[in-house]
């Protein structure tokens, strides 16, 4: 079996530095060429590709193959002329030595474009790309960029935002100021990253299909979702009104005020959506899953706890007053009205949230036929 080890020099570096044109055939001739090219330009990566060709030839000969090592060169003229010159040299090698296969040794992306020319004339078993160790990172980065630019989805995801940023920055800088430009672009990039990272694009893409299926199947949840969306908007509006009435410039107090006023409505929104899911599950399966049944209680419990924590911060800052229990009379026993401190108020809300959650677990386990503690089965 005859194998042609072919070192490709499309840029014609060998002829320009040594005066020798391809094809250069034979081990002795290639070894002489290595010395000549190395002396002419020791930093040229072509020296490494020539040495790699000799190493590959030695390995194949050790395996018992008949090896012909050769170097083909292009020209410094147009690309078509260089490729045709290399094609003629490959034809000459194939006609003279009649190889069964070829191993192509290259050291650059430019040389890699010659591989199809060789493949059209002889079977190529392997392409050996030589990367000089000092420039490995540069070569690897180039190939990664090449693959990246070939991916249409990645181009649209990365290059389009970068291009819009580069266009928007000078426009905003001229119309407003550099500070406004930086703040606007940073906010837009942050929103885009969240949009892609949270998978909102996939959800929005799938939303029309889900809505169509919900209408056709007569799901109750389509109505409850609309109600939930309306309640969520009311919650955002209520939170904004609560923030507008806050005189403190502290960011934490503004955030807590928004949460305090919006959480009840947002909890009702989530409760409406979860109720619709429960009805859909009952209609679809004629059964009530414990997980779905526990969902409304979890929503209410979470809303109570979040409301309690926001109220704690606001009461400590004086933005809201304490909760005052009214006067209670039980027979001869009379309890005077008393206020709750911020810590006591937080404890009451946390305990209430935990109790609601436990009630939901208990009810869900009852309707699903399970118990909180499974009885031990004797062996």
Image (spheres, helix red, strand yellow):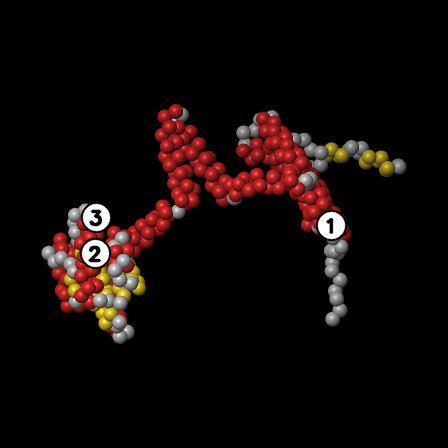
**Identity of the residue drawn at 42% across and 34% down:** 185
> In percent of the image, x 32 and y 53: which residue is there?
140
Q: Earlier in the sequence, mark 3 or mark 1?
A: 3
Element on which disc 1 rests = loop
**Residue at left offset 22%, top offset 58%:** 8
Residue located 13% across and 55% down the image:
15
Question: From where the camera sits, is residue 99 visible?
Answer: yes
Location of mark 3 (residue): 79
Where disc 2 sits, the SS reads helix
| Separation (CA) of disc 3 from disc 2 | 12 Å
* Quadrant of res 235: top right
Residue 99 left/right relative to 331? left
Q: Nearer the viewer, mark 3 or mark 2?
A: 2
Question: Could you tell me how many numbered marks the image carries?
Answer: 3
- Badge 1: residue crowd in 10 Å (few <14, some 14–19, many ≥20): few
Does the residue at mark 3 contact the one at mark 2 (Cβ under 8 Å)?
Answer: no
Q: Nearer the viewer, residue 92 or 377?
A: 92
- Mark 3 and mark 2 lie on one chain; the one further toward the N terminus is 3
Work out which quarter of the rendered image holds the N terminus and state it: bottom left
Q: Which mark is residue 126?
A: none
Classed neighbour count for the residue bearing mark 2: other residues with Cα under 10 Å, few (<14), some (14–19), many (≥20): many
Q: Secondary structure at mark 3?
A: helix
Cα distance between the residues tagged 2 and 1 = 74 Å
Residue 87 is tagged as 2
Residue 216, position in %: x, y? 64, 40
Q: Residue 363 location, x and y as percent?
A: 75, 49
Q: Quadrant of the C terminus?
A: bottom right
- Furthest-front residue in this view: 95
Of pointers 2 and 1, the one earlier in the residue sequence: 2
Q: Is residue 116 above or below residue 306?
A: below
Q: Nearer the viewer, mark 3 or mark 1?
A: 3
What residue is shown with label 1?
287
């Amino acid at each position: 079996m005859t194998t042609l080890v072919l070192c490709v020099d499309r840029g014609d570096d060998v002829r320009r530095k040594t005066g020798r044109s391809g094809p250069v055939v034979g081990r002795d001739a290639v070894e002489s060429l290595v010395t000549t090219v190395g002396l002419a330009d020791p930093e040229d990566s072509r020296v490494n590709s020539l040495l790699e060709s000799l190493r590959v030839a030695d390995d194949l000969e050790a395996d018992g193959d008949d090896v012909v090592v050769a170097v083909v060169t292009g020209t410094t003229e147009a690309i078509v002329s260089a490729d045709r010159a290399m094609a003629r040299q490959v034809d000459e090698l194939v006609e003279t030595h009649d190889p069964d296969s070829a191993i192509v040794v290259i050291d650059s992306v430019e040389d890699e474009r010659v591989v199809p020319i060789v493949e059209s004339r002889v079977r190529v078993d392997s392409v050996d790309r030589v990367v000089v160790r000092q420039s490995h990172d540069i070569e690897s980065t180039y190939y990664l960029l090449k693959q990246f630019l070939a991916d249409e989805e990645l181009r649209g995801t990365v290059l389009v935002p970068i291009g819009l940023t580069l266009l928007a920055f000078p426009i905003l800088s001229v119309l407003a100021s550099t500070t406004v430009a930086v703040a606007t672009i940073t906010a837009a990039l942050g929103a885009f990253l969240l949009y892609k990272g949270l998978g909102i694009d996939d959800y929005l893409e799938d939303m029309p299909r889900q809505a169509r299926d919900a209408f056709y199947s007569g799901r109750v949840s389509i109505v409850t979702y609309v109600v939930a969306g309306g309640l969520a908007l009311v919650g955002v509006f209520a939170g904004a009104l609560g923030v507008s009435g806050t005189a403190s410039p502290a960011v934490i107090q503004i955030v807590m005020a928004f949460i305090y006023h919006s959480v009840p409505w947002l909890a009702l929104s989530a409760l409406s959506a979860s109720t619709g899911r429960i009805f859909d599950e009952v209609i679809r399966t004629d059964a009530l899953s414990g997980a779905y049944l526990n969902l409304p209680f979890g929503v209410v419990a979470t809303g109570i706890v979040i409301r309690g924590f926001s109220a704690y911060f606001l009461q400590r800052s004086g933005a809201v007053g304490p909760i005052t229990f009214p006067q209670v009379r039980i027979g001869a026993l009379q309890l005077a009205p008393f206020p709750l401190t911020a810590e006591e108020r937080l404890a009451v809300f946390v305990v209430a949230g935990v109790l609601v959650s436990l009630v939901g677990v208990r009810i869900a386990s009852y309707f699903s036929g399970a118990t909180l503690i499974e009885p031990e089965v004797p062996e």
